[in-house]
Amino acid sequence: MRVRWRIDGPEKLVIPPFAGRGRKDELWQTTCFEMFIMPKDAAPAYSEFNMSPSERWAAYDFDDYRAGMSQRDFEREPECTMRKGQSIAIFDAALPRVQLPGPPCAIGLAAVIEEEGGVKSYWALAHTKERPDFHDPACFTAGLARTRAA
């Protein structure tokens, strides 16, 4: 599965330095990109995937809203690529489809953007609360449908 985030006006964007592939917790403390997947047949269980421009990543499973967190097994690491130009920055992530929850599912996409001076902003397809909470199932507004054999 390939996912792309686009950032307009990246002049002050803080991009974590290259660290090489590998798991790392708390990527959300600086610029990172997140995807949440909740299979329709497993709700309220869901998975969280965090990916950094540093190429570090994390994957977790939850039994319920912010409860029962465990590391999600990942045999092949995600590929993360950051490109920054003068007017936009693009972050691409490629995650092995066989290691993701299967469709049909609800998906939430989000980003933590850090700018120079420690200024952070929080972006998602939907925010339903006053403060950002990417784990809120109401934020999972995209979907992935099951395909049918031809």
Image (cartoon, grey):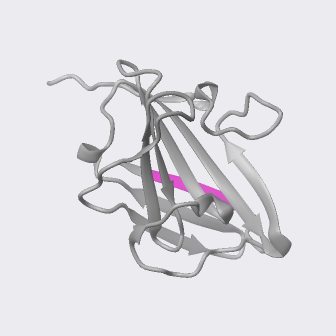
* Front in this rendered view, residue 147 or 139: 139
Residue at 81%, 70% (x, y): give it: 118
Query: Which x, y percent locates residue 67?
Result: 53, 33
Query: Which x, y percent locates residue 135?
Result: 60, 36
Residue farthest to the front, as pictured: 68
Left or right of 77 on screen, residue 63: right
Residue farthest to the left, as pictured: 150
The number of discs equals 0
Magenta-colored stretch includes residue 128: no
Report the span colored magenta.
3-9
Residue at 81%, 75% (x, y): give it: 116
* Front in this rendered view, residue 129 or 2: 129
| Residue 74 to residue 31: above or below | above
Left or right of 122 on screen, residue 22: left
| Residue 96 to residue 100: above or below | below
Left or right of 39 on screen, residue 99: left
Residue at 63%, 58% (x, y): give it: 28
Residue farthest to the top, as pictured: 41
Q: Which quadrant of the rendered structure holds the C terminus?
A: top left
Residue 84: quarter of image: bottom right
Residue 124: quarter of image: top right
Residue at 51%, 81% (x, y): give it: 18
Residue 53: quarter of image: bottom right
Magenta-colored stretch includes residue 6: yes
Query: Which x, y percent locates residue 133?
Result: 69, 38
| Residue 104 to residue 2: above or below | above
